Amino acid sequence: MLDLNDHRYFVHAVDHGGFAAASRALGLPKSTISRRVIELEARLGVRLIERTSRRFVMTDAGSAFYRHAKAMLIEAEAAEDVVASLLAEPTGTVRMTCSVGMARDVSGLISKFLTAYPKVDLVLYTTNKHVDLIEEGFDIGLRGHRTALPDSSLVQRRLADTPWQVFAAPAYLAAQGTPSEPADIAQLATLALGDGTDNLSWQFMRDAQTVVVPIKPRLQSSDMESLKEAAIAGHGIVSLPSYVARDAVTNGTLETVLPAWITQRARISLLMPPRRSQLPSVRALIDFLVDEYPKQLIGSDP
């Protein structure tokens, strides 16, 4: 019959390098741990640990058993944590990171969240550099990405899809002419996301059609707001996520060019270390962003 305690004693013995160290960590007699591991081996019909006065080494069967036993204990603890989190009021500090551009979008929600959860403090770290959430101790990362994020130990949750389109100031289009097809863009001044190291092109997509147009930008920048302001000032056509240009289109300082075409299919996702995402304070912010951020960003549900 399955007994999680036997798995626990075995895992602790391995993690601490012996029965004596495991007994100190668990606060149990060494003889109890040793006896329970021996009984476990007898029940399984295989030796898990080779042990002498000088050696304490797992067998191949022991290594395989350890991986699954360790994972099972982690899941058992997580199950208890989930129940505890449902009973706990969100409190404590949540550390979140996002790009500088995204911080502008999320800033309008911060006050609303803090009002809703008065016992939760928030640290928002903004940078355009890659942040290792686990290594640097963050609870949540907000990421915009054009391709699938690499597989990792992080939990990923989609917030919204964010198509990119091209935009220009009405005065610029009046002076230079409004493109009627993607190829026309190659003859116009462009403003592009980049750092000046690549030969750039925009890929226009409509239904099953794809058209690649080479561009020679007048301005490249990693800051979308700078690109948008340059477009408003009439320096060229810019490719941006639709939500970034939405206010400018609404107030008439930018127009959507080739509205039937998009230049990228992008997405905004939440990334979280798996255990941290179960904390009530972190879960509160996750649920809040899942509900509110798409409305703030897109003006519609994700």
Image (cartoon, rainbow, N blue to C red):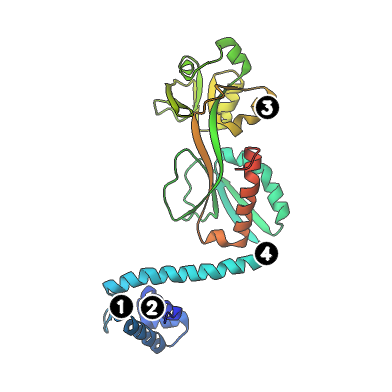
Near mark 1 (Cα within 10 A), the count class, few <14, some 14-19 or many ≥20, is: many
* Of the image marks 1 and 4, the number of the one nearer the N terminus: 1
* Of the image marks 4 and 3, the number of the one nearer the N terminus: 4
Residue identifier under label 2: 10
Near mark 3 (Cα within 10 A), the count class, few <14, some 14-19 or many ≥20, is: few
Quadrant position of residue 299? top right
Q: 233 or 116, which lies in front?
A: 116
Q: CA distance from mark 1 to mark 2?
A: 9 Å
| Vertical placement of residue 249 versus 157, above or below | above
Q: Residue at x 31, y 74 (%)?
A: 62
Residue identifier under label 1: 48
Residue type (three-letter) at the residue carrying disc 4: Glu
Near mark 4 (Cα within 10 A), the count class, few <14, some 14-19 or many ≥20, is: some
Give the SS element for disc 4.
Answer: loop
Q: CA distance from mark 4 to mark 2?
A: 35 Å
Give the SS element for disc 1.
Answer: loop
Residue type (three-letter) at the residue carrying disc 3: Thr
Q: 11 or 213, which lies in front?
A: 213
| Vertical placement of residue 227 versus 162, above or below | above
* Of the image marks 2 and 3, the number of the one nearer the N terminus: 2
Instruction: Pinpoint residue 158: horizontal percent, then vertical percent.
Output: 54, 47
* Of the image marks 4 and 2, the number of the one nearer the N terminus: 2
Residue identifier under label 4: 89
* Of the image marks 1 and 2, the number of the one nearer the N terminus: 2
